[in-house]
Amino acid sequence: MTVLRAAGATDVGLVRSSNEDQLLVAEPLFAVADGMGGHAAGEVASLTAIEALLVAFDGNRSADGLLDAVRDANRAVWEQARERPELRGMGTTMTALALVEKDGDDVLVVVNVGDSRAYLLRDGELDQLTEDHSVPEELRRAGRLSAQEAASDPRRHVLTRVLGVDPEVEVDSFELIPYRGDRLLLASDGLFGDVADDRIAAVLRRRSDPEKAAKDLVALANEAGGADNITVVVVDVLDDDDRAAKASANVSNEVMAMPRPLPTVSGVGAGGDGDATTEQLPRALLTAEPPASAPAPRTGVEPGAPAPRSKLATLALVLVLVLLVGSAAAAVVVYARGSYFVGAQGEEVVIFKGRPGGLLWFRPTVEERTGVRLGDVLPSRAADLRQGKQVASMSEARRYLDNIEEEARAASPPPPATSAPPEAPPPAPAP
Ligand code: MN
């Protein structure tokens, strides 16, 4: 029997006034929904959809039952919008996951409409399972936009598929065989819109408790500006009936266990209009509200922290540049400010901009709080961090942090106690 453990977290973020996301943790069914259509309407859409999904799935706990439940959810939202003029135009995304039995075995079924996502963390690697139903992502899959173009496209909030705007909806669905150690993540775009996948992966690898992982992911998105509502559900496969062991002797299982199974698209739209995505430009059904305003710049400075560059310091900088005209002064500025180091503030690991200890009047400023504690890394690394580990860029800082976390993970749990103390663990191999 497959054993799951799950937790979810949702937060309004730092910019929006209301939370239109909903989450569902009702083992064996899990979901996130990101409502849209204006304040009240967005909340009604996501809540209506989740409730309808739960009720319908309860009546038929199978792979087909989950697909039907999404269609029921679509119709429930659509009917509400039709009956109540003030809710017209509302819609919601829906990404759901259920553990069901199929041919005598347990499978995880993932269904998706819209631009919320499901990810799988397996063997330390994070893979996005779902495809976003947004204009730039459809164009990217059709080969018309590069990944970079799609990521920065102004239409990324324009969805091509959503629940609640038509009586029928096309639902993506696929199945995967759960293995012990698998961790699934459902998330609304408030998470991955502002937080890179490698940062998400680092938290998922670090936090074994799904509740802590969910909370840390929400905190990460808020640290990145919290421009949108943030919702995550983390589902762990704790036990798999030794399926992993058996799978090595079963080729068909290995095929099914590929980390990125191809979605089996189940279209329900009349006329099979779902398979012309390469030629037909997707209809833009709904525009998710872009962030209400640009997120406040993240300074992350707290009492007792190294001071940010204050007005006084800026004034001093200007004065110095005026008085000491020449490249020497500019070079000092670049040297003092133009690099990063990973250090500690109290017991927390923090990425600073500047030089450890500061240089002249340029004191380091907090660039990113990481949520990692000094106690989470090896003692020798903690000592380095107290000194300040200098790096060339933010991405190098993050890589360094990921590496020492990985190293600490590899070193724990410690081997069973023996009479001799265990050898110090070898340094982590270079990535
Ligand atoms: Mn959103």
Image: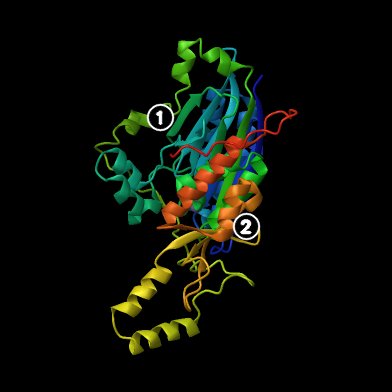
Q: Give the residue type at disc 2.
A: Glu
Check disc 1 and report its element: helix, strand or loop: loop
Which numbered disc, 2 or 1, marks the residue that appears first in the sequence? 1
**In the image, farthest residue toward the top:** 249
**In the image, farthest residue toward the front:** 420
Residue 348: which numbered mark, if any?
A: 2
Note whether 322 is above or below 195 in the view shown.
below
In this orientation, does residue 177 appear? yes
Note whether 186 is above or below 292 in the view shown.
above
Residue shown at the point (51%, 10%) measured from the top left: 249
Q: How crowded is mark 2: few (under 14 residues within 10 Å), some or many (20 or more)?
A: some
x, y percentage for residue 416?
71, 28
Q: How far apart are marks 2 and 1 (CA)?
A: 49 Å
x, y percentage for residue 124?
51, 34
Instruction: Give the residue at mark 1.
Output: 267
In this orientation, does residue 47 appear? no
Foreground: 162 or 263?
Answer: 263
Residue shown at the point (57%, 24%) measured from the top left: 179
Residue shown at the point (67%, 43%) measured from the top left: 211
Examine the image and state in which quarter residue 425 appears: top right
Q: Quadrant of the C terminus?
A: top left
Residue 275: which numbered mark, if any?
A: none
Foreground: 250 or 372?
Answer: 372
Foreground: 380 or 61?
Answer: 380
x, y percentage for residue 202?
53, 44
Q: Residues within 10 Å of mark 1 (few under 14, many from 20)?
A: some
Foreground: 257 or 428?
Answer: 428
Q: Give the residue type at disc 1.
A: Gly
Pointers 2 and 1 in contact (C-beta within 8 Å): no
Check disc 2 and report its element: helix, strand or loop: strand
